[in-house]
Amino acid sequence: MKIKEILGDKYSDSTLKEVEAQLKAIEFKTAEITPKDEFIKMLAHSIENDKPLRVKCGIDPTGSDVHLGHTIPYRKMRQFQDLGHTGVVIIGDYTAQIGDPTGRNEMRQALSQDEVNKNAESYLDQVYSVLNKDRTEVRYQSEWFRDVSLIDVMGWAHQTTVAKLLSHETFKDRLEEGHSLALHELFYPVLQGIDSVYAKADVELGGTDQKFNVLMGRDYQKNQNMRPQIAILLPIITGTCGTQKMSKSFGNYIGVLDEPFDKFGKVMSIPDALMEEYALYASTFGPEEYEKFKTDLKSGTLHPNEAKKQLAINITALFHGEEVGQQMRTQFEEVFKKKNLPDEVPEFKFERGDGLIQVLVSAKLLKSNGEARRMIKQNAVSFMDGDKIQDQEFKLTDDHAGMVLKVGKRKFLKLL
């Protein structure tokens, strides 16, 4: 149905034109808008009355790192902000202590309030890499849940049914597969729905796996005689492995806090079959750029290796700027084509007899002894132009001073 048919003669031609422009921009890289006709009416009312939409997206700070997949809904929020709307980031300091059941067969370990607060601070710093801070409103669930009474909880429970909650795909699957399902987990979608009431959300952004929870917000708003929010769902992108969704637990992610060279290298490591998906959802390509990229890649005009470099520049530049993205290409080509080291290699002063694992962790090249052992076991640790180091008890001697360790494809350390 065309916009004019949905809106009728209620709005001016200039409003209709602006609705069409904003809708076209928002639909690109979006998996679903539900219900779309209501969104068009909401958008028209917002434009005609110069009243920004409140666009909500929640964060459960169950960890401290944000990866590229996490940023997709926040980049859509940034798009809304650039169109004049308000981003509302909900810090799930209560739901984080329950754990989103989506895609899990068992309940998540509970976190303390201190852990949640610390993670939330780190999360916000990272999502601000894509959001306009001046157009972002941050709300904590504790603002409205701190003083909740048992009567309130019973009232919320009264507004939905057990049958509806158990229709949630994950709940249903867990029961069918014989996994446990704790009573408190059923409250996760309820609390997310209540968030929308208190945040006065017009739109809620989430991954396609969040559809059930987002629609709960519509139900609770209707029960409060509020205009129900629109669900805008974004894709769950595949990790760099090419087979599973991007996840820290799978180790197939590109982290916001990764160094630029690591971001570039991780994009270069993706399977060729993943390039169109990354070009559409992970890059900043607009519709015309994306179509040209896809067409040139399919026709052979654009070589897969060059295509991947363009993607790597784009994704690196998203967080570090175009100049850094181009620099990482040059550095990558020097390291992997000319077999030279990067321009800047971290240095570490060791003592004779230091263990290799101790040095790798102390120099912050790897995060833990366990990770260092895994990398050695996988033959991923070597001296430049030397043999792989396979001995986990390897000790450094004076002869190693001035040599360069290489870990994986993208990490280097000069020993002093």
Image (tube, rainbow, N blue to C red):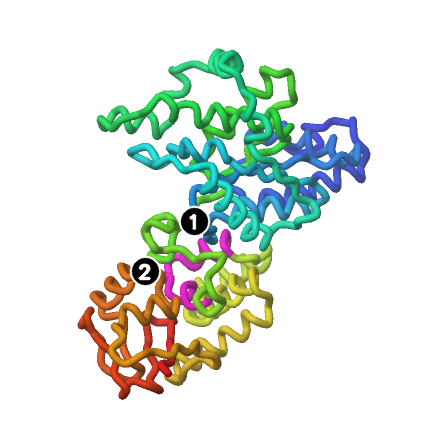
Residue hosting label 1:
237
Main SS class of the magenta portion in the image: helix
Residue under pointer 2: 368
Which is more foreground, mark 1 or mark 2? 2
Q: Image quadrant of residue 169?
A: top left
| Any part of residue 194 in sight | yes
Q: Is residue 209 above or below residue 239?
A: above
Q: Position of residue 322 (x, y in %)?
A: 59, 68
- Does residue 119 appear to the left or right of 253 in the view shown? right
Going by the image, does 181 lie left or right of 345? left
- Ranked by sequence position, the earlier of labels 1 and 2 is 1
Is 355 located above or below residue 4 in the figure?
below
Q: Secondary structure at mark 2?
A: loop
Residue depicted at 19% across the width and 71% down the height:
393
Whether residue 272 is in magenta: the answer is yes
**Residue 166 sits in quarter:** top left
Residue at 68%, 43% in the rendered image: 22
What is the magenta range? 264-282
- Which residue is drawn at the image coordinates 56% and 50% (left, top)? 127
Relative to the observer, which residue lies in front, 163 or 152? 152
Q: Secondary structure at mark 1?
A: loop
Residue 394 spot, x, y in % from top left:
21, 74
Q: Quadrant of the C terminus?
A: bottom left
Percent from the top left, x then y, of residue 311? 49, 64
Viewer-side residue, 211 vs 137: 137
What label does residue 219 carry, if any?
none
Res. 287 in view: no
